[in-house]
């Protein structure tokens, strides 16, 4: 007997009864009940169609037929743990490593980005013998205890756990509204200036006060939760040098931004140049197009240090045949449908048009930044002070959903950055639809402000 679909009210009532209260929903004033997805679109229980501008998990599009087929066919044949030999595990690892610089050649499969980041920390500690970690302000690396400890995005909130002594927070390299701003340092290398902030922490805090060497520098290659931050040129290159000189390793969190989203490169850490190579990379979310799968990729040297403990590493579901079949299909689709190039072309267009809106409405739009299909539009209430327009950003997101059928969200420490991270099949027509609706509501909010 088939289960009868609940009404939206019934679903909300059961969620309120059985689900933890801090498990939040999008659009709390009127949450969506989504029952179907296809490509860059989502459909609610009444059949209303929404343009999805935020779902970076459905990387190659919601319910991509090739990805679904790969998962179904493998599930019908076998799903078991990785202590048995299976071709999918090694084929997936080979394909994943083929996308990496040659030094990154060993894979560990896990189930989520949080778990990948936890394992990366474990690898770093074992390899270096050190514990001190530098993370970026507003960074988010996962919901495990170990990863919350290096996630100021959570640690900065009231009620959060206390930051451990071994964790050090460097300023996010935000050149618009951060500690060091482009409009105050016209002819200076902001990448180097922000990198020197990391070196200062190493010299004064890690070595000076604690008498330690570095374990790891941990950063998203493009910071997402912190407000769609694009690292300034030369930042990662210089930071990686400083960290390695102090005995540490460099970890690139690509859980949000990997697999071609940057448009110009498969991995966002590559944007700063071919010589910028982390020691450990974590991947997740887009790897499974919605299926829970993630991985850690590292060097032979670090993998050897981890194996030298003699402690077996085993993950019940990590690298199972179904997860690996799905991941192989995702990477195939990215290549076959030229989705990285699509991200570049559509992203360049969207970024250019959004910057035109910024020039037209500088009292509303403070900054437009991005690369590929990773774009942030920062709303402000005062062009001189750059004060965040948090409430107007919230209104815009809700109105775009209710009036235009377009799904957006906000991020950044002041929740005033409109973020766009759509499925990679997002096209020029979708971009134009977004731009038209966004301009309409920005103008109305501007008029409302002036009343």
Image (cartoon, rainbow, N blue to C red):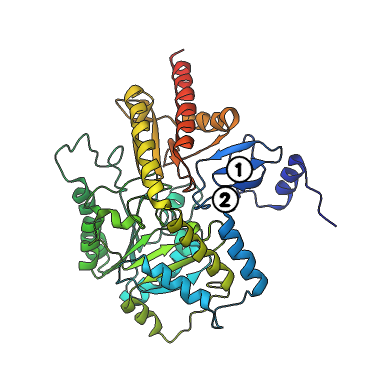
Looking at the image, is 243 positioned above or below residue 185?
Answer: below
**Is label 1 in contact with label 2 (beta carbons under 8 Å)?**
yes
Residue where numbered disc 2 is placed: 62
The residue where tag 1 is placed is 42
C-alpha span from label 1 to label 2? 8 Å
Q: Position of residue 65 (x, y in %)?
A: 59, 56
Q: Tell me, for residue 343, which label it has, or none.
A: none
Q: Secondary structure at mark 1?
A: strand
Instruction: Inspect this view and state whether residue 8 appears.
Output: yes
Residue furthest out toward the bottom: 310
Residue 167 location in percent, x, y? Answer: 36, 60
Q: Nearer the viewer, residue 130 or 449?
A: 449
Q: Quadrant of residue 266?
A: bottom left
Percent position (x, y) of residue 168?
Answer: 33, 58
The quadrant holding residue 48 is top right
| Quadrant where the image shows the N terminus | bottom right
Residue name at image x 42 percent, y 55 percent = 151
Does residue 121 appear anywhere in the picture? no
């Amino acid at each position: 007997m088939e289960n009868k679909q609940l009404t939206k009210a019934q679903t909300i009532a059961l969620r309120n009864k059985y689900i933890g209260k801090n498990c939040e929903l999008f659009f709390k004033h009127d949450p969506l009940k989504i029952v179907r997805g296809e490509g860059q679109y989502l459909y609610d229980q009444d059949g209303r169609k929404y343009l999805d501008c935020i779902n970076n998990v459905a990387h190659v599009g919601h319910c991509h037929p090739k990805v679904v087929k790969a998962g179904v066919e493998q599930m019908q044949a076998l799903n078991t743990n990785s202590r048995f030999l299976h071709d999918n595990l090694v084929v997936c690892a080979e394909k994943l490593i083929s996308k990496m610089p040659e030094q990154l050649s060993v894979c560990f499969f896990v189930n989520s980005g949080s778990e990948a980041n936890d394992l990366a920390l474990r690898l770093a500690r074992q390899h270096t013998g050190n514990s001190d970690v530098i993370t970026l302000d507003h960074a988010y690396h996962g919901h495990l205890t170990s990863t919350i400890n290096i996630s100021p995005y959570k640690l900065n909130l009231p009620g959060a756990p206390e930051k451990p002594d071994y964790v050090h927070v460097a300023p996010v390299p935000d050149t618009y509204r951060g500690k060091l701003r482009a409009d105050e340092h016209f002819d200076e290398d902001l990448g180097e200036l922000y990198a020197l902030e990391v070196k200062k922490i190493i010299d004064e805090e890690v070595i000076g006060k604690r008498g330690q060497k570095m374990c790891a520098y941990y950063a998203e290659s493009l910071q997402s939760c912190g407000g769609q931050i694009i690292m300034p040129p030369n930042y990662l290159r210089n930071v990686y040098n400083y960290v390695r000189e102090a005995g540490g390793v460099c970890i690139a969190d690509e859980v949000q931004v990997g697999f071609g989203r940057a448009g110009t490169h498969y991995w966002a850490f590559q944007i700063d140049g071919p010589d910028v190579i982390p020691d450990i990379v974590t991947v997740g979310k887009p790897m499974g197009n919605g299926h829970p799968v993630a991985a850690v990729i590292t060097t032979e040297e670090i993998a050897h240090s981890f194996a030298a403990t003699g402690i077996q590493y085993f993950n019940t579901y990590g690298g199972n045949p179904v997860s690996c079949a799905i991941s192989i299909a995702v990477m195939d689709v990215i290549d076959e449908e030229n989705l990285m190039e699509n991200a570049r072309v559509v992203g360049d267009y969207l970024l250019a048009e959004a910057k035109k809106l910024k020039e037209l409405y500088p009292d509303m739009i403070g900054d437009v930044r991005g690369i590929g299909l990773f774009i942030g539009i920062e709303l402000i209430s005062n062009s001189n002070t750059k004060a965040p327009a948090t409430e107007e950003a919230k209104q815009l997101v809700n109105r775009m959903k209710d009036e235009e059928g377009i799904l957006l969200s906000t991020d950044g420490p002041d929740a005033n950055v409109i973020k766009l991270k759509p499925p990679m099949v997002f096209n020029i027509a979708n971009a134009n639809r977004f731009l038209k609706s966004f301009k309409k509501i920005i103008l109305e909010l501007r008029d409302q402000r002036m009343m």
